[in-house]
Image (cartoon, rainbow, N blue to C red):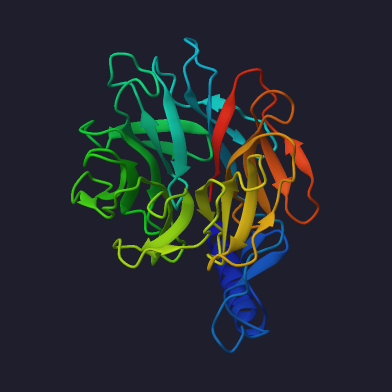
Amino acid sequence: MNQTRRTILTGLLLGALLVLAAGSTLLVRHVPGAARLFRGDPAPPSSGALPPVTAGLSIAPRTEWLAFESQRGRLNDYEIVVMTTDGSRVTNLTQSWADDVSPVWSPDGLRIAFVSLRDTPAGKWGMGPGSIYLMDFDPTAGRAGGLFRLTDGTGDDGWPTWSPDGQWIVFESDRGGDREIWRIRVDGSDLTRLTNSPGEDRHPDWAPDGTHIAFTSERGGDKDIWVMAADGSNPVNLTHSAGRDRYPAWSPDGRKLAFNTLRDGNQEIYIMNADGSEPWNVTRSPSIEGLADWSPDGQRMVLYSDLEDNKEIYVVDLATGRWTNVSRDPASDEFCTWSP
């Protein structure tokens, strides 16, 4: 009797399932706001694509970081420090006994190139040859990873900049006698001298499209902003100013260059078109402004200034002209760059 009842119930259940499968929609997985269709009516889109599962999901934007050199070291040395663009999550990445300076982000934001004096007896900037190091960076955790020494201390190497594909570093060095622009692969191979002029060539910055390098040069008699092809050919003077022009920085779209100048009798940040035309004073400040860098969207800049009687890091909104002090530390904070 029990066996017969089980057989009848099993048959009825199978029949009900067949009816459902033939004439209705079966929901095999539920996600809030969306359902995955298995078979039945209504039919899926003619393209065969399933509806995207989007309801209730959000993608957090990648954190943007500022890297800068700061005299916050326990021995009053310069360290590579990072913070978010609102001044939070301040972290000393290097924690070395010697000076670590001139940080610059790789195009993917996962590494930082910088100059270190840790391989010299004094460990102080200007008292020995600097070497270029590459350091891994975790943008989610905000902490440093592996460290790799790129140059060997044959000369005083400084001011690194990345190629847009992240495969090369261009830097300034006196290893050939006077200061010139050199190029090296990120694995330390293929060291090549790009400039060879009687005047110093310094402060290179690689254009976003990879075709040109802007730099500071004295080859014309004054310190001016020059640009050359990425292989060092066809150098052109963009500024022709009697005032000292230096520290060029390409805008993210490659259409403009920011630079530091003394042409008004005070160190200011100017912006000009990539061909050198239409220069204009961004900062218009009685204080001293140093190196500037662009935000990824080109709407803001980060720079250092002694506006408040101490070198601090400021974010400047280019549309409104508003300055925001994001470092606010008694130590000297300088040479700041914005992550991609």
Q: Quadrant of residue 202?
A: top left
Instruction: Give the residue displayed 68% in from the left and 51% down from the top.
Output: 300
Q: Quick check: 96 left or right of 321?
A: left
Check the image and report above or below for 303 versus 206. above
Measured as percent of width and height from the top left, residue 233 is found at 30, 65
- Depth order, front residue of 61/104: 104
Check the image and report above or below for 218 versus 311. below
Residue 57 in view (yes/no): no
Q: Quadrant of residue 296?
A: bottom right
Q: Quick check: 265 left or right of 260?
A: right
Instruction: Give the residue displayed 34% in from the left and 32% down from the top.
Output: 146
Instruction: Give the residue displayed 30% in from the left and 46% down from the top.
Output: 180
Measured as percent of width and height from the top left, residue 340 is found at 53, 51
Measured as percent of width and height from the top left, residue 239 is found at 53, 59
Check the image and report above or below for 237 versus 12. above
Q: Quadrant of the N terminus?
A: bottom right
